[in-house]
Amino acid sequence: MENALWKGKRLVAYEVSKDYFTEKEIRRASHKGELCCPDPGCKSSILKYCHGEIKQPYFAHRDESDCDYVKYEKASGVFRGLRLLLCEHFSACDYPVQMEAKVLAHHYSHLYFEWEDGTKMAIELGTKRTNIHEVEKLNQEYHDNQVVPIWLVVDHSDKQLDERHTYFLKRYCLNESANKSLLILTYDGKKVVQYKRVPAVHCKTEIGDYLVESQTMFVYEGTCQDLVFENGALTLKGFEETYENLLAYRQSKAEKFRQELLERQRLAKEQEEQRKIEERNMEAYRKEKAAEQQRYLEWMKAQAAKKFAEEYTKRKDSILAMIEQQERQVRDETGIRWIRCEICGEVKEEAEFVSYGGRGRLNIGKCKSCMK
Ligand SMILES: [Zn+2]
Ligand SMILES: [Zn+2]
């Protein structure tokens, strides 16, 4: 274990070991049985200081005892090096950090912070074996003691993370931690990887909802030394800024998409307008062509009528001198017979008469106009 009490002072094993003379004094105190377990409920409270060549310095009970600290050590001894590493880093940042504080009834927090503004936080190290019962029980106890729990996952740092294919603690951090991000600390303490879900980006317009960017996972790497507190949450230095930049970039892509969509719509509308104009022009052209054709036909008809009238007059003129005699039929050069109406006096072609001919009146008749 990391801590011991000696004459009312709290000792930290690795700090004791730094200076030879300090360590010597503590070894003496240990021998005299002056070192006590910091756990107030401990039944066998006397500790010894140990520091050899293999293990890092630590305190241990002289006798096996029913001590919460011992249980805690057994359960989380594997994190001892990591706790030290983190504690040294947070101390260097001047954060008010304590290692192995007993703020809950039978539990030691891996790292504990009491900030100047009264905020209290605890860092819990967990693994894939940390189950929902453990997380919820500790969260509840922390909540009851006005302590904010922060979960840090100790695992290998495979860069890829698929939320649907991972264990509870990772998903818990992604969904329920203060900044909705997951911090993974490697077993060797060398690397910290932070993950945060990046929501899908949609472009909603009047004509539909387009997916511009799919949901993805933002991954950011750093070391223990990059761990900082920002806005009441533990994070890697630079993580939030890079994440926000990514969101802004994705949003800008959505905006660009929207602009292109609007431009395409505008062009399509313009083309449609143009097509309508052309259609109207075409229709006008067709009408004009038809009218022209009609005018031409009428002109042709008029020409034919004019020619016919001219010929009629010409043929009529050619027989006028012969119409008064009644001895011979009067025919023009084309063989058509001509008659004079006895009622209106008009000289017309044979076909325009109702009746004509007879003795002494061979070229006289009654025309259709007069007999109507
Ligand atoms: Zn004890
Ligand atoms: Zn007549």
Image (cartoon, rainbow, N blue to C red):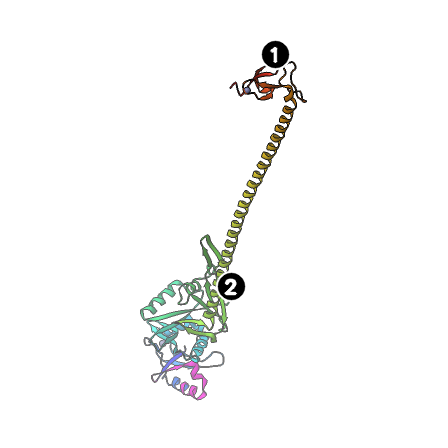
Vertical comparison of 280 with 174: above or below: above
Return the mark for residue 160.
Answer: 2
Contact (Cβ within 8 Å) of mark 1 with mark 2: no
- On the image, the x and y values in percent for residue 301 come to 60, 32
Front-most of 111 and 289? 289
Badge 2: few (under 14), some or many (20 or more) residues near its Cα, within 10 Å?
Answer: few
Helix, strand or loop at mark 2: loop
Total numbered labels: 2
**Residue 48, located in which quarter of the rendered image?**
bottom left
Return the mark for residue 321.
Answer: none
Left or right? Give the position of 177 relative to 325: left
Q: Amino acid at mark 2?
A: Gln
Q: What residue range appears in magenta?
A: 7-26
Residue beneath disc 1 = 360
**Is 120 colored magenta in this rendering?**
no
Q: Amino acid at mark 1?
A: Gly
Residue pushed farthest top? 359
**Residue 87, located in which quarter of the rendered image?**
bottom left
Vertical comparison of 287 with 8: above or below: above
Vertical comparison of 369 with 157: above or below: above
- On the image, the x and y values in percent for residue 332 come to 66, 21
Displayed-image quarter of ligand 2: top right
